[in-house]
Image (cartoon, rainbow, N blue to C red):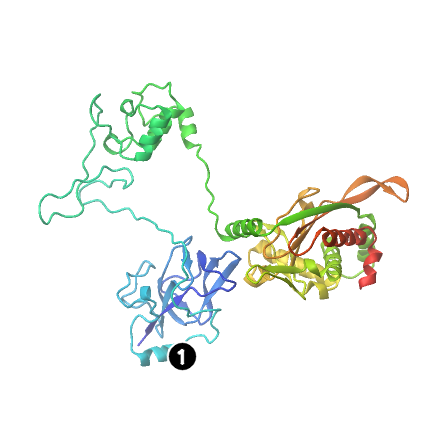
Protein backbone atom coordinates (compact mmCIF):
# COMPACT_ATOMS: atom_id res chain seq x y z
CA UNK A 1 0.00 0.00 0.00
CA UNK A 2 1.35 3.43 -0.96
CA UNK A 3 2.42 5.78 1.81
CA UNK A 4 1.87 9.51 1.22
CA UNK A 5 4.81 11.59 2.48
CA UNK A 6 5.13 15.35 2.62
CA UNK A 7 8.23 17.14 1.38
CA UNK A 8 8.85 20.54 2.99
CA UNK A 9 10.95 23.44 1.74
CA UNK A 10 14.39 22.67 3.21
CA UNK A 11 16.79 25.10 4.83
CA UNK A 12 18.95 26.24 1.90
CA UNK A 13 21.73 27.47 4.18
CA UNK A 14 23.34 30.81 5.06
CA UNK A 15 20.41 31.96 7.21
CA UNK A 16 17.88 32.00 4.38
CA UNK A 17 14.33 31.90 5.73
CA UNK A 18 12.20 31.91 2.58
CA UNK A 19 12.25 31.26 -1.15
CA UNK A 20 10.07 32.12 -4.13
CA UNK A 21 8.77 29.41 -6.44
CA UNK A 22 10.09 30.20 -9.92
CA UNK A 23 9.17 27.08 -11.86
CA UNK A 24 7.67 23.70 -11.07
CA UNK A 25 9.61 20.87 -12.68
CA UNK A 26 6.93 18.21 -12.03
CA UNK A 27 3.15 18.01 -12.24
CA UNK A 28 0.64 16.14 -10.13
CA UNK A 29 0.63 12.54 -11.36
CA UNK A 30 4.30 12.54 -12.40
CA UNK A 31 6.51 9.74 -11.16
CA UNK A 32 9.65 11.12 -9.50
CA UNK A 33 12.86 9.38 -8.59
CA UNK A 34 14.78 9.83 -5.37
CA UNK A 35 16.80 13.10 -5.43
CA UNK A 36 15.12 14.26 -8.64
CA UNK A 37 14.78 18.08 -8.85
CA UNK A 38 11.10 18.96 -8.49
CA UNK A 39 11.03 22.76 -8.24
CA UNK A 40 13.23 25.74 -9.04
CA UNK A 41 13.22 28.43 -6.35
CA UNK A 42 14.86 31.82 -6.01
CA UNK A 43 16.34 32.85 -2.70
CA UNK A 44 18.00 36.08 -1.70
CA UNK A 45 21.25 34.48 -2.84
CA UNK A 46 20.65 32.54 -6.03
CA UNK A 47 18.41 30.29 -8.13
CA UNK A 48 18.34 26.75 -6.74
CA UNK A 49 16.84 23.48 -7.98
CA UNK A 50 15.40 21.58 -5.00
CA UNK A 51 15.57 17.75 -5.18
CA UNK A 52 12.96 15.58 -3.49
CA UNK A 53 14.29 12.89 -1.13
CA UNK A 54 11.34 10.58 -1.90
CA UNK A 55 10.57 8.41 -4.90
CA UNK A 56 6.98 7.87 -5.99
CA UNK A 57 4.00 9.68 -7.52
CA UNK A 58 3.37 13.39 -6.94
CA UNK A 59 -0.09 13.75 -5.39
CA UNK A 60 -0.19 17.49 -4.63
CA UNK A 61 1.79 20.68 -5.03
CA UNK A 62 1.70 23.61 -2.61
CA UNK A 63 2.04 27.09 -4.05
CA UNK A 64 1.83 28.61 -7.50
CA UNK A 65 4.79 29.98 -9.41
CA UNK A 66 5.65 33.39 -7.95
CA UNK A 67 4.58 32.44 -4.42
CA UNK A 68 6.99 32.94 -1.51
CA UNK A 69 7.20 30.12 1.02
CA UNK A 70 8.98 30.03 4.39
CA UNK A 71 11.49 27.33 5.23
CA UNK A 72 9.60 24.33 6.57
CA UNK A 73 6.42 24.98 4.57
CA UNK A 74 5.04 22.05 2.51
CA UNK A 75 6.22 21.90 -1.10
CA UNK A 76 4.54 18.74 -2.35
CA UNK A 77 3.34 15.29 -1.30
CA UNK A 78 4.55 12.03 -2.79
CA UNK A 79 2.85 8.63 -2.72
CA UNK A 80 5.80 6.35 -2.09
CA UNK A 81 5.33 2.95 -3.70
CA UNK A 82 2.50 4.10 -6.00
CA UNK A 83 2.62 3.94 -9.79
CA UNK A 84 -0.37 6.20 -10.47
CA UNK A 85 -2.20 9.10 -8.85
CA UNK A 86 -4.23 7.99 -5.78
CA UNK A 87 -7.98 8.56 -6.20
CA UNK A 88 -8.13 11.09 -3.35
CA UNK A 89 -5.50 13.43 -4.79
CA UNK A 90 -6.42 16.82 -6.14
CA UNK A 91 -6.83 16.67 -9.95
CA UNK A 92 -5.79 20.28 -10.54
CA UNK A 93 -2.42 19.97 -8.90
CA UNK A 94 -3.28 21.83 -5.69
CA UNK A 95 -3.38 20.39 -2.21
CA UNK A 96 -6.69 19.67 -0.52
CA UNK A 97 -7.51 21.60 2.68
CA UNK A 98 -5.53 20.27 5.58
CA UNK A 99 -7.34 18.37 8.29
CA UNK A 100 -6.38 18.38 11.99
CA UNK A 101 -3.01 16.72 12.48
CA UNK A 102 -2.08 17.14 8.81
CA UNK A 103 0.71 19.05 7.07
CA UNK A 104 -0.46 22.37 8.48
CA UNK A 105 0.57 21.13 11.92
CA UNK A 106 3.97 19.85 10.82
CA UNK A 107 3.07 16.23 10.14
CA UNK A 108 5.22 14.57 7.52
CA UNK A 109 2.81 11.70 6.88
CA UNK A 110 -0.77 11.90 5.59
CA UNK A 111 -1.78 8.59 7.14
CA UNK A 112 -0.50 5.20 8.05
CA UNK A 113 0.97 3.30 10.97
CA UNK A 114 4.56 3.62 12.23
CA UNK A 115 5.37 0.37 10.50
CA UNK A 116 4.16 1.62 7.12
CA UNK A 117 6.00 4.89 7.64
CA UNK A 118 9.21 3.00 8.33
CA UNK A 119 8.71 1.00 5.16
CA UNK A 120 8.14 4.16 3.14
CA UNK A 121 11.24 5.74 4.64
CA UNK A 122 13.33 3.02 3.01
CA UNK A 123 12.38 4.51 -0.37
CA UNK A 124 13.82 7.91 0.44
CA UNK A 125 17.19 9.54 -0.15
CA UNK A 126 19.90 9.30 2.43
CA UNK A 127 21.31 12.64 1.25
CA UNK A 128 18.93 15.20 2.68
CA UNK A 129 19.43 18.91 2.07
CA UNK A 130 20.90 21.27 4.65
CA UNK A 131 18.55 21.52 7.60
CA UNK A 132 15.79 19.40 6.06
CA UNK A 133 13.31 18.16 8.59
CA UNK A 134 13.30 21.28 10.73
CA UNK A 135 10.36 22.02 12.97
CA UNK A 136 8.14 25.07 12.82
CA UNK A 137 8.79 27.49 9.96
CA UNK A 138 10.95 30.51 10.68
CA UNK A 139 8.91 33.59 11.50
CA UNK A 140 8.67 35.99 8.57
CA UNK A 141 6.39 38.39 6.81
CA UNK A 142 3.54 36.46 5.24
CA UNK A 143 1.80 37.59 2.12
CA UNK A 144 -1.94 37.62 2.51
CA UNK A 145 -3.80 37.19 -0.71
CA UNK A 146 -7.49 37.90 -0.44
CA UNK A 147 -9.65 35.69 -2.62
CA UNK A 148 -12.76 37.30 -4.07
CA UNK A 149 -15.90 35.68 -2.67
CA UNK A 150 -18.27 34.09 -5.16
CA UNK A 151 -21.58 35.92 -5.69
CA UNK A 152 -24.87 34.18 -4.75
CA UNK A 153 -26.46 31.96 -7.34
CA UNK A 154 -28.43 33.87 -9.94
CA UNK A 155 -26.80 37.26 -9.22
CA UNK A 156 -23.89 39.05 -10.83
CA UNK A 157 -20.40 39.01 -9.28
CA UNK A 158 -19.43 42.26 -7.59
CA UNK A 159 -15.92 43.62 -6.97
CA UNK A 160 -15.32 43.17 -3.24
CA UNK A 161 -13.36 46.43 -3.08
CA UNK A 162 -16.05 48.63 -4.63
CA UNK A 163 -19.39 46.87 -4.05
CA UNK A 164 -21.88 48.46 -1.60
CA UNK A 165 -22.08 46.80 1.79
CA UNK A 166 -24.73 44.12 2.14
CA UNK A 167 -27.48 44.78 4.72
CA UNK A 168 -27.50 42.71 7.86
CA UNK A 169 -29.84 39.70 7.81
CA UNK A 170 -33.04 40.49 9.72
CA UNK A 171 -34.61 37.06 9.94
CA UNK A 172 -33.18 34.22 12.02
CA UNK A 173 -31.29 31.70 9.92
CA UNK A 174 -30.62 34.17 7.12
CA UNK A 175 -27.66 33.20 4.94
CA UNK A 176 -24.36 35.01 5.39
CA UNK A 177 -24.09 35.83 1.69
CA UNK A 178 -26.74 38.48 1.07
CA UNK A 179 -27.49 40.24 -2.18
CA UNK A 180 -25.75 43.63 -2.37
CA UNK A 181 -27.95 46.71 -2.27
CA UNK A 182 -27.73 48.42 -5.68
CA UNK A 183 -26.82 52.10 -5.82
CA UNK A 184 -29.14 54.42 -7.69
CA UNK A 185 -28.47 54.63 -11.41
CA UNK A 186 -28.86 58.40 -11.41
CA UNK A 187 -27.59 60.85 -8.85
CA UNK A 188 -30.16 63.35 -7.57
CA UNK A 189 -28.84 66.72 -6.48
CA UNK A 190 -29.58 66.12 -2.81
CA UNK A 191 -29.40 62.34 -2.68
CA UNK A 192 -26.60 60.06 -1.47
CA UNK A 193 -23.39 59.98 -3.49
CA UNK A 194 -22.80 56.47 -4.98
CA UNK A 195 -19.23 56.04 -3.72
CA UNK A 196 -18.00 53.69 -1.04
CA UNK A 197 -14.20 53.84 -0.93
CA UNK A 198 -12.82 56.40 1.58
CA UNK A 199 -9.77 56.72 -0.69
CA UNK A 200 -11.97 57.85 -3.57
CA UNK A 201 -13.69 60.41 -1.35
CA UNK A 202 -10.35 61.69 -0.05
CA UNK A 203 -8.89 61.96 -3.56
CA UNK A 204 -11.92 63.90 -4.77
CA UNK A 205 -11.83 66.20 -1.77
CA UNK A 206 -8.12 66.97 -2.16
CA UNK A 207 -8.50 67.70 -5.87
CA UNK A 208 -11.70 69.75 -5.51
CA UNK A 209 -13.86 67.30 -7.48
CA UNK A 210 -17.62 67.35 -6.86
CA UNK A 211 -18.63 63.71 -6.66
CA UNK A 212 -22.28 64.61 -7.30
CA UNK A 213 -21.29 65.85 -10.75
CA UNK A 214 -19.73 62.52 -11.76
CA UNK A 215 -21.39 59.51 -13.33
CA UNK A 216 -19.81 56.33 -12.07
CA UNK A 217 -18.62 53.57 -14.37
CA UNK A 218 -18.93 50.86 -11.70
CA UNK A 219 -21.84 48.51 -11.06
CA UNK A 220 -25.14 50.43 -10.86
CA UNK A 221 -23.37 53.76 -11.33
CA UNK A 222 -20.84 53.30 -8.53
CA UNK A 223 -18.11 55.98 -8.68
CA UNK A 224 -14.67 54.40 -8.89
CA UNK A 225 -11.21 55.87 -8.46
CA UNK A 226 -10.70 55.78 -12.22
CA UNK A 227 -13.72 58.08 -12.62
CA UNK A 228 -12.20 60.65 -10.27
CA UNK A 229 -8.78 60.40 -11.96
CA UNK A 230 -10.40 61.02 -15.35
CA UNK A 231 -12.15 64.09 -13.93
CA UNK A 232 -8.82 65.36 -12.56
CA UNK A 233 -7.04 64.82 -15.86
CA UNK A 234 -9.76 66.52 -17.92
CA UNK A 235 -11.48 69.14 -15.72
CA UNK A 236 -12.89 71.00 -18.71
CA UNK A 237 -14.70 67.94 -19.99
CA UNK A 238 -18.51 68.14 -19.52
CA UNK A 239 -19.68 66.14 -16.51
CA UNK A 240 -22.37 64.46 -18.58
CA UNK A 241 -19.89 62.94 -21.01
CA UNK A 242 -20.16 59.13 -21.07
CA UNK A 243 -17.66 57.58 -18.68
CA UNK A 244 -17.22 54.62 -21.02
CA UNK A 245 -15.80 56.79 -23.81
CA UNK A 246 -13.34 59.31 -22.33
CA UNK A 247 -11.10 61.46 -24.48
CA UNK A 248 -7.80 59.86 -25.59
CA UNK A 249 -5.80 62.32 -23.48
CA UNK A 250 -7.80 61.37 -20.40
CA UNK A 251 -7.17 57.67 -21.07
CA UNK A 252 -3.44 58.30 -21.42
CA UNK A 253 -3.35 60.31 -18.19
CA UNK A 254 -5.28 57.64 -16.30
CA UNK A 255 -2.94 54.93 -17.58
CA UNK A 256 0.20 56.84 -16.56
CA UNK A 257 0.62 55.28 -13.13
CA UNK A 258 3.83 54.71 -11.21
CA UNK A 259 5.49 51.33 -11.56
CA UNK A 260 6.08 49.40 -8.36
CA UNK A 261 8.92 46.87 -8.31
CA UNK A 262 8.93 44.41 -5.37
CA UNK A 263 12.14 44.44 -3.32
CA UNK A 264 12.64 40.70 -3.15
CA UNK A 265 15.05 38.06 -4.33
CA UNK A 266 18.49 39.38 -5.28
CA UNK A 267 17.31 43.00 -5.48
CA UNK A 268 15.86 42.80 -1.98
CA UNK A 269 18.98 41.15 -0.58
CA UNK A 270 21.19 43.87 -2.06
CA UNK A 271 18.94 46.58 -0.62
CA UNK A 272 19.01 45.01 2.85
CA UNK A 273 22.78 44.53 2.85
CA UNK A 274 23.56 48.03 1.57
CA UNK A 275 21.20 49.63 4.08
CA UNK A 276 22.75 47.67 6.92
CA UNK A 277 26.24 48.62 5.75
CA UNK A 278 25.41 52.32 5.79
CA UNK A 279 23.76 52.03 9.22
CA UNK A 280 26.54 50.12 10.95
CA UNK A 281 29.84 50.96 9.23
CA UNK A 282 31.52 54.38 9.65
CA UNK A 283 33.10 54.32 6.21
CA UNK A 284 35.60 56.69 4.63
CA UNK A 285 37.01 56.86 1.11
CA UNK A 286 40.40 57.86 -0.26
CA UNK A 287 41.52 57.79 -3.88
CA UNK A 288 44.51 58.31 -6.14
CA UNK A 289 45.23 58.48 -9.88
CA UNK A 290 47.78 55.98 -11.18
CA UNK A 291 49.63 55.51 -14.46
CA UNK A 292 48.62 52.03 -15.65
CA UNK A 293 50.63 52.12 -18.89
CA UNK A 294 53.28 49.65 -17.67
CA UNK A 295 50.65 47.32 -16.21
CA UNK A 296 48.83 47.18 -19.55
CA UNK A 297 52.14 46.54 -21.32
CA UNK A 298 52.99 43.75 -18.87
CA UNK A 299 49.65 42.08 -19.50
CA UNK A 300 50.17 42.31 -23.26
CA UNK A 301 53.60 40.69 -22.90
CA UNK A 302 52.20 37.88 -20.73
CA UNK A 303 49.50 37.05 -23.25
CA UNK A 304 51.94 37.22 -26.15
CA UNK A 305 54.16 34.63 -24.47
CA UNK A 306 51.54 31.90 -24.98
CA UNK A 307 49.38 29.92 -22.61
CA UNK A 308 46.05 30.95 -21.11
CA UNK A 309 45.21 34.62 -21.43
CA UNK A 310 45.53 36.73 -18.28
CA UNK A 311 42.72 39.16 -17.49
CA UNK A 312 43.28 42.65 -16.15
CA UNK A 313 40.96 41.86 -13.25
CA UNK A 314 43.19 38.93 -12.29
CA UNK A 315 46.28 41.18 -12.19
CA UNK A 316 44.43 43.71 -10.03
CA UNK A 317 43.30 40.87 -7.75
CA UNK A 318 46.87 39.65 -7.42
CA UNK A 319 47.92 43.17 -6.46
CA UNK A 320 45.11 43.31 -3.87
CA UNK A 321 46.15 40.08 -2.18
CA UNK A 322 49.76 41.28 -1.98
CA UNK A 323 48.59 44.59 -0.47
CA UNK A 324 46.41 42.77 2.09
CA UNK A 325 49.43 40.72 3.15
CA UNK A 326 51.15 44.01 3.98
CA UNK A 327 48.08 45.59 5.55
CA UNK A 328 46.06 42.76 7.17
CA UNK A 329 43.97 45.30 9.09
CA UNK A 330 41.79 45.66 6.00
CA UNK A 331 41.13 41.91 5.66
CA UNK A 332 38.92 41.92 8.72
CA UNK A 333 35.45 42.26 10.16
CA UNK A 334 34.04 43.85 13.30
CA UNK A 335 32.27 41.79 15.97
CA UNK A 336 29.98 44.47 17.40
CA UNK A 337 28.63 42.29 20.22
CA UNK A 338 32.08 41.37 21.49
CA UNK A 339 33.51 44.79 20.54
CA UNK A 340 36.41 43.12 18.76
CA UNK A 341 38.13 43.47 15.40
CA UNK A 342 38.55 40.02 13.82
CA UNK A 343 41.51 39.88 11.42
CA UNK A 344 41.05 37.00 9.02
CA UNK A 345 43.90 34.71 7.95
CA UNK A 346 42.48 33.83 4.51
CA UNK A 347 41.63 36.18 1.64
CA UNK A 348 38.32 35.28 0.00
CA UNK A 349 38.04 37.92 -2.69
CA UNK A 350 34.62 39.09 -3.82
CA UNK A 351 34.13 40.90 -7.11
CA UNK A 352 31.11 42.85 -8.26
CA UNK A 353 29.31 41.40 -11.29
CA UNK A 354 26.31 42.97 -13.01
CA UNK A 355 23.73 40.46 -14.26
CA UNK A 356 20.19 40.52 -15.59
CA UNK A 357 19.00 39.70 -12.07
CA UNK A 358 20.93 42.60 -10.53
CA UNK A 359 24.29 43.15 -8.87
CA UNK A 360 25.87 40.06 -7.32
CA UNK A 361 29.23 39.57 -5.63
CA UNK A 362 30.67 36.09 -6.27
CA UNK A 363 33.60 35.08 -4.06
CA UNK A 364 36.94 33.61 -5.17
CA UNK A 365 38.08 31.32 -2.37
CA UNK A 366 41.69 31.47 -1.17
CA UNK A 367 42.59 34.20 -3.66
CA UNK A 368 45.92 34.79 -1.90
CA UNK A 369 47.08 31.30 -2.89
CA UNK A 370 46.16 31.60 -6.57
CA UNK A 371 48.29 32.60 -9.53
CA UNK A 372 47.18 35.10 -12.15
CA UNK A 373 46.16 32.20 -14.42
CA UNK A 374 44.12 30.56 -11.68
CA UNK A 375 42.43 33.86 -10.81
CA UNK A 376 41.57 34.47 -14.46
CA UNK A 377 39.96 31.05 -14.79
CA UNK A 378 37.96 31.42 -11.57
CA UNK A 379 36.74 34.91 -12.45
CA UNK A 380 35.57 33.62 -15.84
CA UNK A 381 33.79 30.62 -14.31
CA UNK A 382 31.97 32.59 -11.65
CA UNK A 383 30.99 35.32 -14.11
CA UNK A 384 29.46 32.77 -16.48
CA UNK A 385 27.57 31.08 -13.65
CA UNK A 386 26.36 34.46 -12.36
CA UNK A 387 24.98 35.46 -15.76
CA UNK A 388 23.23 32.12 -16.01
CA UNK A 389 21.62 32.76 -12.61
CA UNK A 390 22.89 29.49 -11.12
CA UNK A 391 25.24 30.75 -8.41
CA UNK A 392 24.92 28.79 -5.19
CA UNK A 393 24.75 30.42 -1.74
CA UNK A 394 28.30 29.21 -1.14
CA UNK A 395 29.46 31.16 -4.22
CA UNK A 396 28.05 34.39 -2.81
CA UNK A 397 29.05 34.31 0.85
CA UNK A 398 32.15 34.32 2.99
CA UNK A 399 34.01 37.15 1.26
CA UNK A 400 36.63 39.09 3.25
CA UNK A 401 37.48 41.88 0.75
CA UNK A 402 35.82 43.11 -2.45
CA UNK A 403 37.28 44.30 -5.75
CA UNK A 404 34.87 46.49 -7.72
CA UNK A 405 35.76 47.25 -11.34
CA UNK A 406 33.19 49.92 -12.15
CA UNK A 407 35.35 51.13 -15.02
CA UNK A 408 33.45 48.72 -17.27
CA UNK A 409 30.51 51.14 -16.99
CA UNK A 410 32.59 53.96 -18.42
CA UNK A 411 33.04 55.90 -15.16
CA UNK A 412 36.23 57.15 -13.56
CA UNK A 413 35.48 57.19 -9.85
CA UNK A 414 33.03 56.14 -7.18
CA UNK A 415 32.51 55.94 -3.42
CA UNK A 416 31.16 52.38 -3.17
CA UNK A 417 29.28 51.02 -0.18
CA UNK A 418 31.20 48.35 1.72
CA UNK A 419 29.91 44.82 1.29
CA UNK A 420 28.84 44.13 4.88
CA UNK A 421 30.37 42.60 7.02
CA UNK A 422 33.68 43.20 5.25
CA UNK A 423 35.95 46.11 6.19
CA UNK A 424 37.05 47.51 2.82
CA UNK A 425 36.52 47.62 -0.93
CA UNK A 426 38.87 48.68 -3.72
CA UNK A 427 37.24 50.45 -6.65
CA UNK A 428 38.84 50.66 -10.10
CA UNK A 429 37.72 53.18 -12.71
CA UNK A 430 38.19 53.11 -16.46
CA UNK A 431 41.70 53.20 -17.91
CA UNK A 432 41.88 55.99 -20.50
CA UNK A 433 44.61 58.07 -22.19
CA UNK A 434 45.34 61.27 -20.27
CA UNK A 435 48.13 63.85 -20.17
CA UNK A 436 50.64 62.76 -17.53
CA UNK A 437 54.08 63.86 -16.44
CA UNK A 438 56.33 60.86 -17.14
CA UNK A 439 60.07 61.01 -16.45
CA UNK A 440 59.93 64.78 -16.25
CA UNK A 441 58.08 65.28 -19.52
CA UNK A 442 54.45 65.68 -20.44
CA UNK A 443 53.14 62.56 -22.20
CA UNK A 444 49.93 60.75 -22.96
CA UNK A 445 49.63 57.80 -20.59
CA UNK A 446 46.99 55.21 -19.63
CA UNK A 447 45.59 56.57 -16.37
CA UNK A 448 43.22 54.96 -13.88
CA UNK A 449 41.60 56.22 -10.69
CA UNK A 450 41.76 53.89 -7.69
CA UNK A 451 39.50 54.40 -4.67
CA UNK A 452 39.47 52.62 -1.33
CA UNK A 453 36.41 52.69 0.91
CA UNK A 454 37.23 51.35 4.38
CA UNK A 455 35.70 50.84 7.79
CA UNK A 456 37.26 53.52 9.99
CA UNK A 457 36.85 51.25 13.02
CA UNK A 458 39.46 48.74 11.80
CA UNK A 459 42.17 51.25 10.90
CA UNK A 460 43.04 54.92 10.53
CA UNK A 461 43.82 56.93 7.43
CA UNK A 462 47.52 56.10 7.57
CA UNK A 463 46.89 52.38 7.08
CA UNK A 464 44.28 52.96 4.37
CA UNK A 465 46.57 55.40 2.59
CA UNK A 466 49.49 52.98 2.79
CA UNK A 467 47.40 50.19 1.30
CA UNK A 468 46.15 52.35 -1.56
CA UNK A 469 49.60 53.77 -2.26
CA UNK A 470 51.08 50.27 -2.48
CA UNK A 471 48.34 49.22 -4.93
CA UNK A 472 49.03 52.32 -7.04
CA UNK A 473 52.78 51.62 -7.01
CA UNK A 474 52.19 48.07 -8.27
CA UNK A 475 49.89 49.39 -11.01
CA UNK A 476 52.47 51.96 -12.10
CA UNK A 477 55.41 49.56 -11.82
CA UNK A 478 54.44 45.86 -11.83
CA UNK A 479 58.02 44.98 -10.89
CA UNK A 480 57.19 46.14 -7.34
CA UNK A 481 54.86 43.15 -7.09
CA UNK A 482 57.74 40.73 -7.72
CA UNK A 483 59.07 41.44 -4.25
CA UNK A 484 56.13 39.62 -2.70
CA UNK A 485 55.95 36.67 -5.12
Badge 1: how crowded within 10 Å, few (<14), some, or many (20+)?
few
The C terminus appears in which quarter of the rendering? bottom right
Say which of 354 and 485 sits in front: 485
**Side of 345 relative to 435 (left or right):** left
**Side of 343 relative to 125 (left or right):** right
| On screen, residue 170 above or below 310 | above
| On screen, residue 385 above or below 51 | above
Residue 406, image x, y percentages: 67, 47
Say which of 234 and 81 sits in front: 234
Say which of 51 and 166 sits in front: 166
Total marks drawn? 1
| On screen, residue 67 above or below 344 | above
Let me know if residue 310 appears in the view: no
The N terminus appears in which quarter of the rendering? bottom left
Residue 218, image x, y percentages: 28, 33
Residue at 74% x, 62% y: name it. Answer: 325
Residue at 29% x, 78% y: name it. Answer: 113
Let me know if residue 199 appears in the view: yes
**Side of 284 relative to 467 (left or right):** left
Residue tagged 1: 122
Secondary-structure class at tag 1: loop
Q: Quadrant of residue 38?
A: bottom left
Residue 471, image x, y percentages: 76, 53
Q: Residue furthest bottom?
A: 115
Residue at 29% x, 35% y: name it. Answer: 197
Q: Quadrant of residue 467?
A: bottom right
Amino acid sequence: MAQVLEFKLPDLGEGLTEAEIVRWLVDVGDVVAIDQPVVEVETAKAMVEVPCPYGGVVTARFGEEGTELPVGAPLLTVAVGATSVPPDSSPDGQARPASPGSAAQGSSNASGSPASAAAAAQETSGNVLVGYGTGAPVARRRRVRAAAAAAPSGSARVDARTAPAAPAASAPGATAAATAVPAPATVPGDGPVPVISPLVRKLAREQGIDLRALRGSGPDGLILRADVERAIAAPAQPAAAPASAPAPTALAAAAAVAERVPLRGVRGAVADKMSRSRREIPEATCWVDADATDLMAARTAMNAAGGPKISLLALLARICTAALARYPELNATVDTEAREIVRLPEVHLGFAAQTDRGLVVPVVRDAHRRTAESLTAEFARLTEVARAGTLTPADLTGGTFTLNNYGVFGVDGSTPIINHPEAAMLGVGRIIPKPWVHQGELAVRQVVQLSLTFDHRVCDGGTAGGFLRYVADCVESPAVLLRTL
